[in-house]
Amino acid sequence: MTRKHYYLLALSSFFALFSLLMAWYTILAPSQIFPTALLLIISIPPLLLPLRGFLKGDLKSCTWLCYISLIYFTHGAVEAYANPAERSYALAELLLSFLLCLGAGMYVFKTEK
């Protein structure tokens, strides 16, 4: 795969993960304990921090996005283990965050030195 393919993989994974998180906390399985707004305020901003540079293809932003995606990978793994009712959403989060990390990491790795 070329560098552009990895960038497209990371880009599609990013928007799919963003959409999944928005849908999970608002439509698919809203929390009965915590307010929806609180969950969105906690879970969405870390994903949006490197967005501007990521859309420009900046290598530093892609590296940070790779690091940040590991938080979502961990969250997906813990949710899949601890919450059987929402296991499918957690496994989707786990897969998308892995693909995001893979795409962003390989995009940076394949850079001409």
Image (cartoon, rainbow, N blue to C red):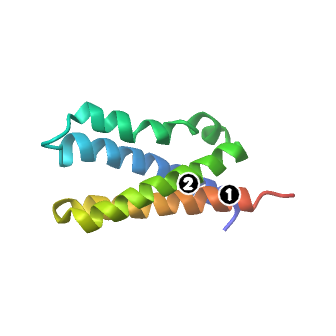
Residue at horizontal 67 percent and vertical 56 percent from the top: 4
Vertical relation: 41 (above or below) 81: above
Between 67 and 17, the residue placed more toward the observer is 67
Q: Position of residue 76 (x, y in %)?
A: 36, 60
Q: CA distance from mark 2 to mark 1?
A: 8 Å
Mark 2 and mark 1 residues within 8 Å of each other at the beta carbon: yes
Q: Position of residue 68 (x, y in %)?
A: 53, 49
Q: Amino acid at mark 1?
A: Tyr
Q: Residues within 10 Å of mark 1 (few under 14, many from 20)?
A: many
Horizontal relation, residue 10 to residue 37: left or right: right
Q: Classify the position of the N terminus by image quarter.
A: bottom right
Name the quadrant containing residue 93.
Answer: bottom left
Q: Position of residue 30 (x, y in %)?
A: 18, 43
Which residue, given by chain and number where applicable, does mark 2 sit on?
10
Between 61 and 111, the residue placed more toward the observer is 61
- The answer to which of marks 2 and 1 sits earlier in the sequence is 2
Q: Secondary structure at mark 1?
A: helix
Outermost residue toward the left?
Answer: 32
Q: Secondary structure at mark 2?
A: helix
Q: Amino acid at mark 2?
A: Ala
Horizontal relation, residue 76 to residue 15: left or right: left
Residue at horizontal 50 percent and vertical 57 percent from the top: 70
Which residue, given by chain and number where applicable, does mark 1 sit on?
107
Which label sits on residue 41? none
Horizontal relation, residue 59 to residue 83: left or right: right
Name the quadrant containing residue 101.
Answer: bottom right
